[in-house]
Amino acid sequence: AQSVTQLDSHVSVSEGTPVLLRCNYSSSYSPSLFWYVQHPNKGLQLLLKYTSAATLVKGINGFEAEFKKSETSFHLTKPSAHMSDAAEYFCVVSAPYSSASKIIFGSGTRLSIRP
Amino acid sequence: DSGVTQTPKHLITATGQRVTLRCSPRSGDLSVYWYQQSLDQGLQFLIQYYNGEERAKGNILERFSAQQFPDLHSELNLSSLELGDSALYFCASSVGDNANYGYTFGSGTRLTVV
């Protein structure tokens, strides 16, 4: 069985400061992990993915995430927030090549950026 | 533009009615996935089609059905609509029959049932 927990429903940071969005997962298998971003009234866009290659994954728009097996975490970070980063972020876990019905989306973290 | 096209963008209809949502996948993608996003339930997987065949089923109600046509576009049919069916409905696509390398999502159809 798999599950994913996004530890914060809302994170607010000032523009230019670091961003940390936390995600913990549980999986019976070596998981595939993803982060998606959803801007208001838009579809979800893939930010980055981990599929058992390098544990530090770089994504688009300066985001990166580190897979830590010992901590069952896959936190999303960015060194310096930009106003355009304000959006909803979803952490996703699946077993590699598993059925779509077994792909689990987190409940989302809303990121707000203060000027 | 992600390459996944969903129409219509907005739909307002009355309870008891039937609607059809349409999705064209990104060029070259053979799989289409339908998701429902609501405030209380989050993102829920409904159904997947791969090259015209149903491949996986999630929490899809019996009042809902879908199909994928030979040109790979897909339609999601929602019937006997209830107020609780109001939600954003997303279509996503992928090349293979699994989403191991991630999905490409459309911008969604916002359904309001009144």
Image: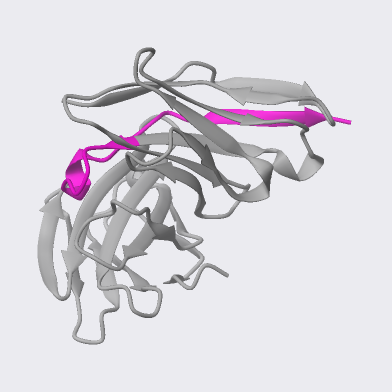
Q: Decide which of B74, A59 is in the foreground and name it.
A: A59
Render colour scheme: one colour
Q: Decide which of B109, A5 is in the foreground and name it.
A: A5
Image side of residue B67 versus residue A38, left or right: left
In magenta segment, residue A15: no
Q: For the C terminus of chain A, which image quadrant?
A: top right
Residue found 54% across the figure and 36% down from its top: A89
Q: Is residue B13 visible?
A: no
Taking A78 as reference, is A40 above or below it? below
Residue found 56% across the figure and 46% down from its top: A59
Residue A70, image x and y in percent?
Answer: 35, 13
Magenta stretch, residue numbers = A93-115
Q: Decide which of A43, B77 is in the foreground and name it.
A: A43
Residue A72 figure quarter: top left
Q: For the N terminus of chain A, which image quadrant?
A: top left
Taking A96 as reference, is A3 above or below it? above
Taking A22 as reference, is B39 above or below it? below
Image side of residue A60 versus residue B12, left or right: right
Residue B16, image x and y in percent?
Answer: 26, 56
The extreme top residue here reads A71
Residue found 25% across the figure and 86% down from its top: B71
The extreme right residue here reads A115
Residue B72 figure quarter: bottom left
